[in-house]
Image (cartoon, rainbow, N blue to C red):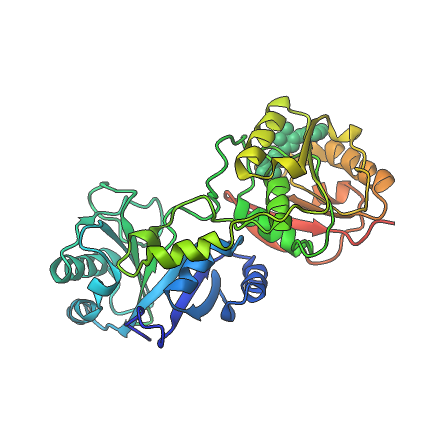
């Protein structure tokens, strides 16, 4: 693997982290956006490129949770070898001596099995070869990752991830920083917001990629995630246009080049259709409007305060209804929600002929209660610890 990622002649591997279960959808997005050699792997998608592609992935991809630049890969059979090889990584070309660094390590099926000791060797290599301040990672609740003794943390720190798998140590830099579902517009959120990255991938899985001018309706819009994502996609707005990224803190960052990349992609094209949200909670509706305004899509979105039983299709061509209704936190708890799902299904079946429907929920019994003609094999993903599935219909008759 290339250890000189600043050289444009030597592209390196870029790992796009996906919510497990949605890797194929992210792979399709990466391919659509022209990334080189998108390949689906467990937990994400790999593409190849240099730092400008890393920046572009953060700026443009709606479905990636974060973007890791794989800067080095070597075999390490014991800690002394790890120590030696970690010192050969050209840290000064990648990291800055004045920016704190946090190292997280994990070990799997390897002779080096102590993640804490592995992280410590890499920290020492960075501290001694580059002189960057080291910040201890906050302890993790579960897993074998390096739980450092001190809970000290620094959110400004650049994160290095070392993964030792089958004696192969792969070192990556987290180029994103805060998770990419944080687009930088949403101040107001309700109790169970859908992550923007998941919402975008569910929209794509429903065939919505902004190419066709179809309206999108979310009749239980909460904080407005689906409606805002759909409007942004239609308007050609880049998801990362308003936020900062960890790569801005790296030695490889070129502000002028980044500005030209960002500047050329931040303008909206007014969509030919509108995007609609409604909710029976007045607070959610106000929240959605405010979030849409902040995202710059207020002019193309409409939010109304009413229950789903009062939902009627907007004027104009049919499009997509996408909704994640309330679901029971535990299996079986959803029984009380069956009447709500049934009523929703009736409303959609009787009033939305010509539309397609996508429903995200955690219990097959709830989906079944809608009596909608769902296609086989919906994608499943964990949303905040709850396994949810996208149930999709074709065009309703
Ligand atoms: C899981 S949340 C949706 C979250 C939303 N996708 C987001 O990203 O913020 C479910 C929403 O359904 C709304 N809701 C529940 N019953 C409803 C009904 N009968 N009619 C309309 N909205 C309803 C709740 O007020 C809540 O905002």
Q: Quadrant of the N terminus?
A: bottom left
Q: Is residue 32 left or right of residue 162?
A: right
Of residues 134 and 22, the one nearer the viewer is: 134
Query: Is residue 275 depicted above or below 34 in this figure?
Result: above
The answer to whether residue 168 is visible is no
Q: Give the image location of residue 72, x and y in percent.
A: 29, 69
Residue at 75% over, 56% down: 375
Query: Is residue 183 depicted above or below 252 in this figure?
Result: above
Query: Is residue 230 depicted above or below 301 in this figure?
Result: below
Q: Give the image location of residue 258, x and y in percent.
A: 39, 56
The answer to whether residue 117 is visible is yes
**Residue found farthest to the left:** 128
Q: Is residue 131 left or right of residue 377?
A: left
The answer to which image quadrant residue 286 occupies is: top right
Residue at 60% over, 41% down: 228
The answer to which image quadrant residue 34 occupies is: bottom right
Query: Is residue 37 depicted above or below 113 in this figure?
Result: below
Residue at 64% over, 24% down: 281
Q: Give the image location of residue 94, x and y in percent.
A: 26, 62
Q: Is residue 235 left or right of residue 49?
A: right
The answer to which image quadrant residue 156 occupies is: top left
Of residues 304 and 121, the one nearer the viewer is: 304
Of residues 249 and 161, the one nearer the viewer is: 249
């Amino acid at each position: 693997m290339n250890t000189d990622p600043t050289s444009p002649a030597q592209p390196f591997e870029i790992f796009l982290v996906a919510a497990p279960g949605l890797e194929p959808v992210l792979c399709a997005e990466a391919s659509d956006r022209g990334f080189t050699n998108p390949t689906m792997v467990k937990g994400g998608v790999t593409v190849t490129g240099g730092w400008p592609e890393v920046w572009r992935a953060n700026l443009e991809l709606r479905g990636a949770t974060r973007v890791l630049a794989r800067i080095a890969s070597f075999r390490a059979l014991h800690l002394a070898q790890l120590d030696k090889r970690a010192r050969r990584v050209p840290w000064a070309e990648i990291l800055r001596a004045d920016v704190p660094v946090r190292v997280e390590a994990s070990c799997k099926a390897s002779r080096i099995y102590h993640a804490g000791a592995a992280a410590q060797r890499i920290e020492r290599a960075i501290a001694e070869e580059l002189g960057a301040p080291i910040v201890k990672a906050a302890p993790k609740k579960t897993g074998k990752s390096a739980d450092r003794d001190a809970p000290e943390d620094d959110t400004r720190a650049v994160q290095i991830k070392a993964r030792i798998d089958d004696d192969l140590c792969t070192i990556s830099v987290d180029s994103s920083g805060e998770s990419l579902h944080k687009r930088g517009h949403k101040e107001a959120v309700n109790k169970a917001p859908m992550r923007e990255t998941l919402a975008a991938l569910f929209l794509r899985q429903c065939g919505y990629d902004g190419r066709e001018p179809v309206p999108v309706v979310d009749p239980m819009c909460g904080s407005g995630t689906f409606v805002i994502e759909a409007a942004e996609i239609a308007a050609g707005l880049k998801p990362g246009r308003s936020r900062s990224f960890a790569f801005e803190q790296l030695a490889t960052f070129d502000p002028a080049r980044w500005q030209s990349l960002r500047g050329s992609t931040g303008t909206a094209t007014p969509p030919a259709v509108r995007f609609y949200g409604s909710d029976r909670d007045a607070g959610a509706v106000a929240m959605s409007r405010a979030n849409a305004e902040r995202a710059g899509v207020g002019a193309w979105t409409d939010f109304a305060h009413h229950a789903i039983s009062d939902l009627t299709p907007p004027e104009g061509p049919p499009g997509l209804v996408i909704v994640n209704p309330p679901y029971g936190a535990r299996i079986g708890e959803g029984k009380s929600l069956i009447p709500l799902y049934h009523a929703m299904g009736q409303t959609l079946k009787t009033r939305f002929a010509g539309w397609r429907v996508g429903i995200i929920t955690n219990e097959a019994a709830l989906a079944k209660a809608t009596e909608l003609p769902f296609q086989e094999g919906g994608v499943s993903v964990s949303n905040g610890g709850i396994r949810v599935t996208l149930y999709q219909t074709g065009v309703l008759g």
